[in-house]
């Protein structure tokens, strides 16, 4: 063996030893787990498409510790973006609910419906369990409704104002045409009260500075995007315009629920309206209020928003 090969062999052994020690001491990579509702969402990291989510979740190995720009996208839903940090030997699990354009996700679950100190038709308070659902962030606008029915003439001019003078049948048909539906009375109240169970969309105390209420009858509504978001992230749940719900109105609906009848009246003279309008006082603007003396089929203060089931 040539003498000069001995240092070379020693150097190679040293390199191999260092590599082995580094490999043994190197912390395991970070793990990112992404679950989405619905599945089938494309996942991109730093602008590079990684894969698509499945029902059991998508597992991504993060070799290098650094901030990563995460983008989740699927046709028919708003793109969800965020910046994440996954350190070595860290497992980060993300559960993301994708949202259809212009809609918010309402968690559902059990909530207390009604008000024990309210009118007869608001009593008694009772527990209702709902599946999660989506709901429009704003009332349907004049512009949106005119896109559905070009001959529509609103009670108040302005593309961003809520569509009013709308009958229940027209509201129902519009939501169906959008692949949505009118919210049930229970869904509407849960969205208005939020997880906190507020009396008004913005809190427990009536405040004319936080919603479009307490004004003269001839004043009218304002643009839907100019309102303050409530507890569920929805705008205009208190005041601005009354909103149609899917249910028939029943004076004794809550009393019947205590007897096990949760479906509501199968028919009636009037469908449920909720939320109050720009002229409503504290009582009429409460999330729990159920006006039972309304016999009109349409009115300049009647509007609506749509809901949608999760896939």
Image (cartoon, rainbow, N blue to C red):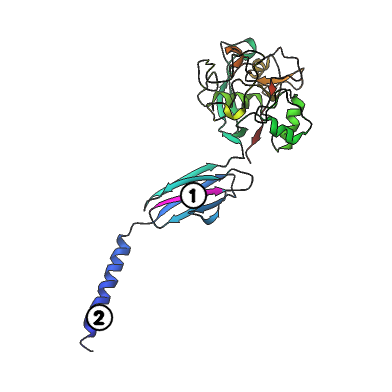
Range drawn in magenta: 65-72
Tell me if residue 106 is in the magenta stretch. no
Tell me if residue 71 is in the magenta stretch. yes
Return the residue found at the far front: 157
Residue 104 visible (yes or no): yes
Indicate which disc residue 206 carries.
none
Element class at badge 2 = helix
- Image coords of residue 15 (percent x, y): 28, 72
Q: Residue at x 57, y 26 (%)?
A: 227
Q: Characterize the local packing of mark 1: few (<14), some (14-19) or many (20 or more) Cα atoms within 10 angstroms.
A: some
Element class at badge 1 = strand
- Image coords of residue 193 (percent x, y): 55, 23
Write down the residue under mark 1.
70
Closer to the camera in the image, 45 or 223: 223
Q: Residue at x 29, y 72 (%)?
A: 16
Return the residue found at the far left: 3
Return the residue found at the far right: 151
Q: Is residue 65 above or below residue 269?
A: below
Left or right position of 159 against 107:
right
Q: Main secondary structure of the magenta part?
A: strand
Left or right position of 59 against 108:
left
**What count of labels does the image hold?**
2
| Quadrant in which residue 7 is drawn | bottom left
Return the residue found at the far bottom: 1
Q: Quadrant of the N terminus?
A: bottom left
Q: Residue at x 64, y 16 (%)?
A: 219
Q: Earlier in the sequence, mark 1 or mark 2?
A: 2
Closer to the camera in the image, 151 or 184: 151
- Image coords of residue 53 (percent x, y): 55, 51
Write down the residue under mark 2.
8
């Amino acid at each position: 063996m040539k003498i000069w090969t001995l240092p070379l062999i020693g150097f190679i052994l040293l390199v191999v030893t260092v590599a082995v020690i580094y490999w043994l001491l190197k912390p395991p990579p970070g793990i990112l787990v992404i679950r989405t509702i619905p599945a089938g969402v494309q996942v991109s990291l730093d602008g590079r498409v990684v894969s698509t989510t499945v029902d059991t979740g998508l597992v991504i190995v993060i070799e290098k510790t650094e901030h990563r720009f995460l983008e989740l996208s699927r046709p028919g839903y708003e793109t969800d973006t965020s910046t994440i940090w996954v350190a070595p030997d860290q497992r980060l699990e993300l559960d993301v609910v994708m949202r259809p354009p212009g809609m918010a996700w309402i968690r559902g679950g059990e909530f207390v419906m009604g008000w024990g100190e309210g009118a007869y038709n608001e009593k008694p308070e009772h527990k209702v369990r709902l599946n999660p659902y989506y709901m429009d962030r704003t009332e349907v606008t004049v512009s949106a409704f005119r896109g559905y029915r070009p001959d529509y003439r609103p009670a108040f001019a302005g593309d961003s104002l809520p569509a009013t003078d709308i009958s229940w049948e027209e509201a129902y048909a519009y939501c169906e045409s959008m692949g949505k539906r009118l919210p049930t009375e229970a869904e509407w109240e849960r969205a208005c009260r939020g997880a906190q169970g507020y009396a008004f969309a913005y809190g427990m105390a009536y405040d004319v500075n936080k919603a479009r209420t307490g004004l003269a009858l001839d004043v009218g509504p304002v643009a839907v995007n100019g309102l303050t978001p409530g507890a569920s992230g929805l705008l205009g749940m208190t005041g601005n315009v009354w909103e149609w719900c899917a249910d028939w109105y029943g004076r004794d609906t809550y009393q019947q629920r205590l007897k096990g009848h949760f479906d509501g009246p199968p028919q009636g003279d009037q469908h449920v309206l909720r939320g109050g309008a720009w002229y409503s006082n504290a009582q009429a603007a409460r999330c729990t209020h159920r006006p039972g003396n309304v016999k009109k089929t349409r009115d300049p203060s009647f509007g609506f928003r749509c809901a949608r089931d999760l896939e």
